[in-house]
Amino acid sequence: MEAAPSSSSTSTSTSSGGSVTFYDFLDRMRNPASLDLVRSIKSFIVSFSFYTPSPDNDGKKVQDFYLSMEAAIREHPLWAAATFEELDSAMEGLEKYVMTKLFSRTFASVPEDAKIDREVSEKICLLQTFLKPEHLDIPAVLHNEASWLLAEKELQKINTFKAPREKLLCIMNCCRVINNLLLNASMSENHALAGLDDFLPVLIYVTIKANPPQLHSNLKFIQLYRRQAKLVSEAAYYFTNLVSAKTFIVDLNGKSLSMDEIKFEESMQAARLTQTNRATQIEASPTLQGQTDPTPTRMHDKEKDTSGGSNYPYMDAEAGELTVGDVERLLSLYKDVVTKYTSLYKAVRHLSMSKTENPVPHSEGTSFLLTQPEGTNTKIDHQREN
């Protein structure tokens, strides 16, 4: 079997390099000479709201826009003497800006995506209760909890980003950890690499352990909106393997594993029963709402704080302490905070309007700015029209 590509062959830069690329793109868009490019970008983003979501058609529109903008940038005076790397950086910046702006419109844009996400996550939750490495024929020499945990953490970051490139980097970083595990095992343990026969089972196991949020939607988003010229080589290899891992998990049954089929069905049924009973107990008992087991968590102990913060017990909570049962309580607290904030805002606004102070005049020459993509701390200037 073909071995996984070496990390050194990657055509995708690091996250820090991606930030520099993005900021350079924004800086160039502030130049008055880029007015025509800014207009094209704004027009494309606005036009997207006119169409009913259709993932395949939306993906084609975005890919066509990338190509047209690449041609425009190549011919633009600002990039007249640009190298290939500089042009590529401009396109990376463009992709991040456009897809961050369009994220809410393009990510999981149809109900079917949310349904598949839920089904995949629920099945993984069941598998987590009994699946072991040996069920996937993972050799003992590759049993490395530290490496697996690191790979899981990288994969779980995927939902913290909105740009296709950054989501893809999460997948690549996860797979590089696994690939390094295989390489180290081959050198230190004299384990003959079996390529995909070793790599894919470990990736499947890591994916099940990680249960990354909205896995289906994230894979679909990358496939549709990552520039096609960048889904090649190492990136394509790792991405395709995770797609295969997801497909394997969706279709997984007793015949897929080194496990007795009857034992598999019994384990799945027991896991379903446990989840059903747990959900029933939480709904029936107010004292269990916000907990998935009878042992109080450190987070709930914080409710006993007498320092005045007992109304908001999650203030000092860590993400890993939260449970599914906490959602209802968090929603209630969120509504409480919003209600108080709204009342306070109205009171302050009423007080301000009642004053007779003259407003402070705006400074002349203030430039207008495009709204920055959420999650970034910089802006593209609107170019002032004559």
Image (tube, rainbow, N blue to C red):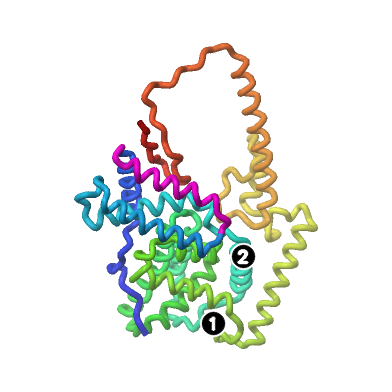
Relative image position of residue 171 (x, y in whole percent): 43, 65
Residue picked out by circle 1: 135
Assign a secondary structure to mark 1: helix
**Labels 2 and 1: the sequence-earlier one:** 2
Secondary structure predominantly adopted by residues drawn in magenta: helix
Of tags 2 and 1, the one toward the viewer is 2
Compare residues 86 and 246 and report the one nearer the observer.
86
Quarter holding the N terminus is bottom left
Distance of mark 2 from mark 1, alpha carbons?
A: 31 Å
Relative image position of residue 53 (x, y in whole percent): 56, 58
Residue type at mark 1 is His
Give me the residue at 32% from left, 74% from top. 5
- Does 50 appear in magenta? yes
Crowd band around label 1 with a 10 angstrom C-alpha radius: few (<14), some (14–19), many (20+): some
Is residue 329 depicted above or below 85 in this figure? above
- Magenta stretch, residue numbers: 32-53
Is residue 209 depicted above or below 268 in this figure? above
Is residue 177 depicted above or below 2 in this figure? above
Residue picked out by circle 2: 112
Quarter holding the C terminus is top left
- The tag on residue 31 is none
Give me the residue at 57% from left, 44% from top. 316
Task: Kindly indicate whether the residue at mark 1 contacts the one at mark 2 (C-beta within 8 angstroms).
Answer: no
Give me the residue at 58% from left, 56% from top. 52
